[in-house]
Image (tube, rainbow, N blue to C red):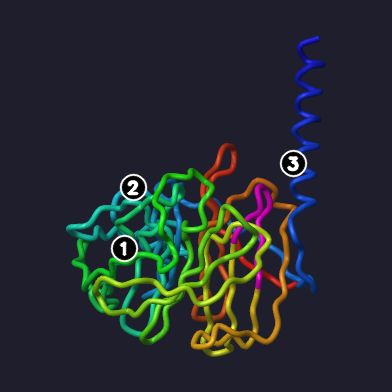
Amino acid sequence: MFRFIQTKIALFMLGIIMVLLACIPREEPEASYRLAYIRELPAVLQENSGMTELGNLIWFINDGGNEPALYGYSMEQDAVLRTVVVRDVVNTDWEDIVQNENYLFIGDFGNNSGDRTNLRIHIIRKSELLEDTDTITMAGTIAFSYSDQTSFTPQVENTPFDCEAFIATRDSLYLFTKNWQEFETRIYSLSIEPETQVAKLRTKWSVPGLVTAAAWAPDNQELLLLGYTPLIPFIRVYTEFSPDNLTYQDRVGRDFGDFWGTQTEGILISSDNTVYISSEGVLDNNASLYRLEFE
């Protein structure tokens, strides 16, 4: 009898999940992408939240509560070869790491409850990280708030002011929010200047779930947004993307139902234009690395 009840509960929950998934808006056309599993990541990256490529290594960060450090991972050796601690800073909720020509930017803007008043983006000189060192000093910090946020009452996983994704240009940063309330991402802009700023709301885009990472390829003007629905990873690709105007020519997407339950967290476009995606360890799914491929 107990097993019968368990089965009924499981079927009921599955039914709810299917209804929720059916309500998620889909975008057309669907792109011919697939996720190719590469390998599990080292244990120290179990809670990875962002990655970027520099100096023949993939540099990962971990999310809130972990060490304020960058981890230089070698694809060839499948190992973390360097751990560089950022001095005089706390990892409140690091969620993404991006770069422009001269700097790395670490987004300490995870905000699941929407009540943070200490949102930060830390700036690091790329040249300093390339030196043989195990600690590094920030070049500066951007403290910011959102132009349209007036209430800071905690709303756990029910706020439009969470963020896990951004991109960097020569002089600006563009944030793509993780909106727990609606199927959209709000896009804000900031200067790269290390000062207190107000992030200006520029526009809103519809998305099929929660955006967790972004990558931009200036050479071919492609923007990639990574995320997940309640249970299924997705990617959206925007061609002819203009950061200045936040416009694009076409948008295509793909949901990866074969990776049900995978919490995708990081994305980068490598120097050879390979797109790598990382996932965080959740339940029985260990943190892993994937490659985005055409079918």
Quadrant position of residue 52: bottom left
Q: Identity of the amino acid at label 1?
A: Arg
Q: Identity of the amino acid at label 3?
A: Ile
Query: How many labels, in total?
Result: 3
In the rendered image, residue 137, in percent from the top left (x then y), is placed at 18, 67
Q: Is residue 229 above or below residue 168?
A: above
Quadrant position of residue 193: bottom left
Given contact means CB atoms under 8 Å apart, are the residues at marks 1 and 3 in contact? no
Q: Is residue 246 above or below residue 2?
A: below
Mark 2 lies on a secondary structure that is: loop
> Closer to us: mark 3 or mark 2?
3
Q: Which residues are magenta?
A: 227-236
Quadrant position of residue 84: bottom left
Q: Residue at x 49, y 88 (%)?
A: 244
According to the picture, the residue beneath numbered tag 2 turns out to be: 66
Let me know if residue 295 appears in the view. no
> Closer to us: mark 1 or mark 2?
1
In the depicted view, which residue is nearer to us: 141 or 40? 141
Let me know if residue 257 appears in the view. yes
